[in-house]
Amino acid sequence: MQGQNQQQAYDRGITIFSPDGRLYQVEYAREAVKRGTASVGVRTADGVVLAADRHARSPLLERDSIEKIHKADDHVGIASAGHVADARQLIDLARRQAQVNHLRYGEEIGVESLTKEVTDYIQQYTQTGGARPFGVALLVGGIEDGEPRLFETDPSGTPYEWQAVAIGGDRDEIQTFLEEEYDEGMDLEAGLSLALRALGSVSDDGLDATGVDVATIDVESEQFTALSEDEIAERVTELELEGDDDE
Amino acid sequence: MQGQNQQQAYDRGITIFSPDGRLYQVEYAREAVKRGTASVGVRTADGVVLAADRHARSPLLERDSIEKIHKADDHVGIASAGHVADARQLIDLARRQAQVNHLRYGEEIGVESLTKEVTDYIQQYTQTGGARPFGVALLVGGIEDGEPRLFETDPSGTPYEWQAVAIGGDRDEIQTFLEEEYDEGMDLEAGLSLALRALGSVSDDGLDATGVDVATIDVESEQFTALSEDEIAERVTELELEGDDDE
Amino acid sequence: MQGQNQQQAYDRGITIFSPDGRLYQVEYAREAVKRGTASVGVRTADGVVLAADRHARSPLLERDSIEKIHKADDHVGIASAGHVADARQLIDLARRQAQVNHLRYGEEIGVESLTKEVTDYIQQYTQTGGARPFGVALLVGGIEDGEPRLFETDPSGTPYEWQAVAIGGDRDEIQTFLEEEYDEGMDLEAGLSLALRALGSVSDDGLDATGVDVATIDVESEQFTALSEDEIAERVTELELEGDDDE
Amino acid sequence: MQGQNQQQAYDRGITIFSPDGRLYQVEYAREAVKRGTASVGVRTADGVVLAADRHARSPLLERDSIEKIHKADDHVGIASAGHVADARQLIDLARRQAQVNHLRYGEEIGVESLTKEVTDYIQQYTQTGGARPFGVALLVGGIEDGEPRLFETDPSGTPYEWQAVAIGGDRDEIQTFLEEEYDEGMDLEAGLSLALRALGSVSDDGLDATGVDVATIDVESEQFTALSEDEIAERVTELELEGDDDE
Amino acid sequence: MQGQNQQQAYDRGITIFSPDGRLYQVEYAREAVKRGTASVGVRTADGVVLAADRHARSPLLERDSIEKIHKADDHVGIASAGHVADARQLIDLARRQAQVNHLRYGEEIGVESLTKEVTDYIQQYTQTGGARPFGVALLVGGIEDGEPRLFETDPSGTPYEWQAVAIGGDRDEIQTFLEEEYDEGMDLEAGLSLALRALGSVSDDGLDATGVDVATIDVESEQFTALSEDEIAERVTELELEGDDDE
Amino acid sequence: MQGQNQQQAYDRGITIFSPDGRLYQVEYAREAVKRGTASVGVRTADGVVLAADRHARSPLLERDSIEKIHKADDHVGIASAGHVADARQLIDLARRQAQVNHLRYGEEIGVESLTKEVTDYIQQYTQTGGARPFGVALLVGGIEDGEPRLFETDPSGTPYEWQAVAIGGDRDEIQTFLEEEYDEGMDLEAGLSLALRALGSVSDDGLDATGVDVATIDVESEQFTALSEDEIAERVTELELEGDDDE
Amino acid sequence: MQGQNQQQAYDRGITIFSPDGRLYQVEYAREAVKRGTASVGVRTADGVVLAADRHARSPLLERDSIEKIHKADDHVGIASAGHVADARQLIDLARRQAQVNHLRYGEEIGVESLTKEVTDYIQQYTQTGGARPFGVALLVGGIEDGEPRLFETDPSGTPYEWQAVAIGGDRDEIQTFLEEEYDEGMDLEAGLSLALRALGSVSDDGLDATGVDVATIDVESEQFTALSEDEIAERVTELELEGDDDE
């Protein structure tokens, strides 16, 4: 009986407060994020690493079409977790904002500014009626004034800045792993290893280089760089993260 | 009692999240896709094949009026499964976008760009109130920069790229068949055979050439080409896919 | 109890998907079509026949005011079944589209194009909130490029092309009759007989010439021609379709 | 329990289909028509008669302010039954349409065209949300191309043409009376008698000349003419329709 | 149980038909009229009388601020009963319409035209969603073409013309009194007496001159004239309508 | 069970009539007024007094920020009771209207006109959907044509003029006190005493000068004047209204 | 059973009055404020102190990205408690208003004016449908005309001015602490100590300098100044507010 009434409850339109001050639709949108595969971000002294699990439901599906890491501007990458179609909308927004900044001010948009443009947009979908919240979380990583920055956006429209963070499925376990292993002084390569190991820490079958998407934005070049499958495979092997296929 | 309450639940307006982070209206729209007859897409080295089941409810119905495969542009074909009237809207959208590209840039629209224009449009119907999602999935196949491409759009507005894929009724069985039989190196003719055999694999009564719609877009001509009934019949016979009418 | 809950269910506003992927309001609109008297269309080698049952609830009602067959353009006729006031809106739409085509391109609109203009309009009323679907089906018959064409539109907004088809009350029985009796090679006069016999097949009391509306669009003249009551009576007598009033 | 649930059902906003394809709000609007006093129309060879019951709830109420028969244009009269305030809106619409026709084309609007302008307007209130249907039926009588015409509009927005027809309270009994007594060849005076007798046939207390509103539109003058109370009283006496006040 | 369900029923938004063809919100608005104190109108040969009960809930309340009779134009007065704030809106509308008529046509607006402008406005609030009906009835009295006219508007938007009429609390009793005592040939002074006696007929405590508002619009001057408290007191005394305060 | 159903009932959107002709949302808004602390207005021969209780929930709260009496124009003050944030909107409206009058006509707005601008605005929130009524009552006091005027606005949008009146918590008790003690001939100082005594009559702990807000608008200066805390304290002492803190 | 019905109740759209005159959505929004960590404001003779608890859920989260205290203009700071994404919208509004004032009037906006711009905006979200209230409270502190001012905004849109105040979690306990310890004559440094001690009074584990955000706006410089982590740590140590980590 309770289950059915709850079903009625969330099937009503607008996002409003419950008696204990919670926004149910936003909390349910957070569940949608958890239903997605995980993404990880690590900020190091000389750049930011974004890594994402993109295992496919069929061997015939092109892994590259599972969009988990996106280039938002030359100096900014975005990893997502959750409802894929929603993520696309926010990433398009971020790209447009980055372009507008180039056109208007002749310079690159700041990573923090860009993140807040996105979270302000998300917030509107949690307050005004006639639409549901976005069921997606983003990691926005990039270089601003020569410094690496790493932000998270959540379905409530709150921006957070992190040293290292996970979103999506198994977030809690991966975050614990990051908290234990993160070292503020690590370089980009170490960060890259940490990101892969973090993703691998929740995988029973080991990591498959084709099932992981990795990109870096380093302080020197200030360029978003996607790693090739070979580059990823090399590190997965080095880190002994492959699964033991024989068993 | 449960049934009735569920009925109330889905009869409410807007698409919103359930407590476990799912969008029920989108999932119900996926059911609408499964209620349609199957369509199959196969990408080969030298082109893309689209094939669709279009069996008719009456012998007096013109098979050609059961629209399953559509030419979107010279170099792009679209196969659909699900709610027919919804499919028509999305295909009109795709055609308009292709024309706009010709007019604006003097060149053909990319297959991926075209697909994403369509999925972005679909996504809006899953987030903003006052309308229901589209109850249809599409296969968008074509040639881009000399390469064959094959995309799927689903009711959530997510684009996927495939080597070979099925949508609509019996999707799971057909997809399993494709996964077992697909070979990356196969040529267009082999792909065509695979597509027909895949459709035939779920048909107890065998395939009827008049009940199948087939088109190819090959790398050489970069042209959408619909097969004639004779061309289809010839292959059905060769592949021994006809039903045994005597029994 | 179930009845009441269903009543609540359909009395809610917008057309959305049920858990099994159906659009209830569209299916209920199909029931509205069945509540109307039947209309029949038959495509023959040299033209299209439209015939419709229009029996009146009172002898004082002018039969001609029971609008079942309408001239949409010189070369196109439309027969309807279902909610009369809804039919009027769609027929007005069809007439306007036909006129616009004359004005814009200086030529007659194609029968298929005209049908699809109508079905696209119908589809919008099944997806966007704030209105109910159209409770009417149409048969659109005419000549296009010298060829007879016969289309059906249904409340979902799907167009179908037919050799012979029935809509409205007793549709299934009449369609079965048509499937048994239809012959692709029949001429217009044979088609006319078939249409009348099909309508007569579900009438216990026989056909009354004043209770039937008949029109043809033939390949030679490409003109919509309504039959006079005498012309209809003559054929009803020949076909021995009158009821036996003495019993 | 059932009663209460039905009450909930009709108290919801928009006009939509029930599972058996009916539009409940339109059917309830028809009940509103039956709650009004009756109006009768009779078409004769040389003109149309409109007659209406307008008995008053208080002797101090001015009978002339009970608006039942209205002049829409010189050559068209309209009788109404049902929700009075709704009738006023439709009659204003008809008058405006008649004027527009004079201004635009320099000629009188056809009776059929005028009726269909009104029914198209009524239909919109049965399909689009945010408003209820009109709770009124109209009889539109007039001369078109020298011929008397008599139409009915109902709350669904369907136009009907009649030889003789009743709307409002006791419609069924009066219609049966008309069917028995109507003669196609009757002249205007005979039609007038028939209309009065039809109204009288359902009145236990006889007709009161002050409680009846009568108008004619004759072929010769093509003018709407309201009968004076004396003219009506004279006929009521001749037809022996007065009640027997002594008992 | 029934009470609660009814409460749910009327607490839904829009004004729609019940199964028996009634508009509940309009009927409830009529109850709001009955909750107001009574107003009376009497038409005599040489003018119209408007009288209204305006007893106050506190002796400190200024009687003049209980607005029951309003001057709409030099030649038109309006008395109201029911929801006071609603009445103000309609009286403002009437005043604006009267001014517009002066500006546009250089002449006074007719009493009937003015009434129908108001009822047309009221009707819209009973058909279109997003608002409730007006909970007020008005008596519109004035001189038109040298003749006294007296109209009533009700919450459905229906105009009625009366010789003498009551609205508001105790309407039925007062109307019966008026029907018994009204004489078509009475002069304005007799009409004034009748109006006061009618109001007094339902007052157990007698009439208090300060608790009554009276105005006349006479044929000769064609001017709205409000009676002073002394003028009212004089007549109340003459008619022996004061209460017996000693008991 | 009853409680829950009522909860459902008032939690629906729009303000509509109950079967007995009441507007529940307006009545609930009147309850919101009663939840506020009281305000009192007294009209005397030489000016108007406004006094208001503004006791604070914390000693650290600045009493002056509990806005109960506001200057609307040089010659008009407004006291409020009920929902504070709503009061601010209406007072802003009053101030804007007063300014507009200065700009447009070069003169001060009349107190009655100003009150009615506000009540007309309030009324709209009780009739049109999409918003709730204002949960506040106002006392509008000022000088108009040399005369002191005192008006009340309530949540229904009705204006009342008073000699002396209370709004907010304990309204009934305070009003009874005013009715017993008010004397039409009293001067401003006597009115001021009456207002303070009225507020004190419902306070068990006596009046605290810092917990009362007082202003006058006198006939001579035609100026709104707020009393200082000392001026209030002096009178509270004189009137022996302080509480007995020792007990 | 009760719980479920309440759930239904608050899950309906618009903010309206309950029978006892309360606005439930506003009260639920106040609960959202309590779910946030606390913020404290203290007004002293020579400036305003804002202090806020910003403990982080993960050591990898950048404390600075937990936005609790914001600079709105050179002379105004804002501390928030509650729904973070909502707070961002209101702070952006405040910043825009401050800039507009600079542009339009060439001077700094007053602290009170700024607060009331914000509360007027908040109020609209509690009265008009289609959106929920803001789930956040703000402390607005600054210098106006050389005087320190400290305001609170709550979810109803009411502005309050305080000497010292707490918002967010544990508000009641902290406020009691402030009431006991606040001294009107204290200087800025004493106020700063009071603010930190107030926050520490509800912390079982003691205060962590990195988990507290502190800013001052002093009368002399009229500048918003954020304290460094070292400055905070120094005071936390002096006040012996650190937790005893060994146990």
Image (cartoon, coloured by chain):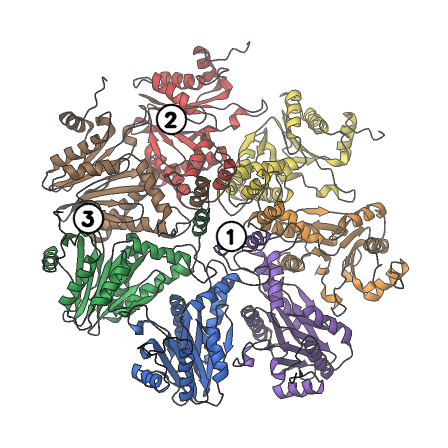
Chain colours: A brown, B red, C yellow, D orange, E purple, F blue, G green
Give the foreground label among 2 and 1.
1
In the displayed structure, G29 sits above or below B96; it is below
Q: Amino acid at mark 1?
A: Asn
Secondary structure at badge 3 equals loop
- Give the CA separation, mark 2 to mark 1: 65 Å
Secondary structure at badge 1 equals helix
Q: Position of residue A46 (x, y in %)?
A: 11, 41
Tell me if mark 3 has few (under 14), some (14-19) or many (20+) residues whose alpha carbon lies within 10 angstroms of its own: some
Image mark 2: chain: B
Q: Which mark is residue B223?
A: 2
- Give the CA separation, mark 3 to mark 1: 57 Å
The residue where tag 3 is placed is A108
Q: Position of residue D88 (x, y in %)?
A: 66, 60
Give the foreground label among 3 and 1.
1
Image mark 1: chain: F
Quarter of the image containing the C terminus of chain A?
A: top left
Which image quarter: residue D208? Answer: bottom right
**In this rendering, position of residue C133 left or right of residue F80:** right
Q: Position of residue A40 (x, y in %)?
A: 22, 37
The count of marks equals 3
Q: Which mark is residue D3?
A: none
Image mark 3: chain: A
- Give the CA separation, mark 3 to mark 2: 42 Å
The residue where tag 1 is placed is F5
Question: In this orientation, does residue C48 appear?
Answer: no
In the displayed structure, F246 sits above or below E116; it is below
> Residue at (47%, 83%) from the top-left corner?
F149
Give the foreground label among 3 and 2.
3
Labelled pair 3, 2 in contact (Cβ < 8 Å): no
Q: Amino acid at mark 3?
A: Glu
Secondary structure at badge 2 equals loop
In the displayed structure, E121 sits above or below A40; it is below
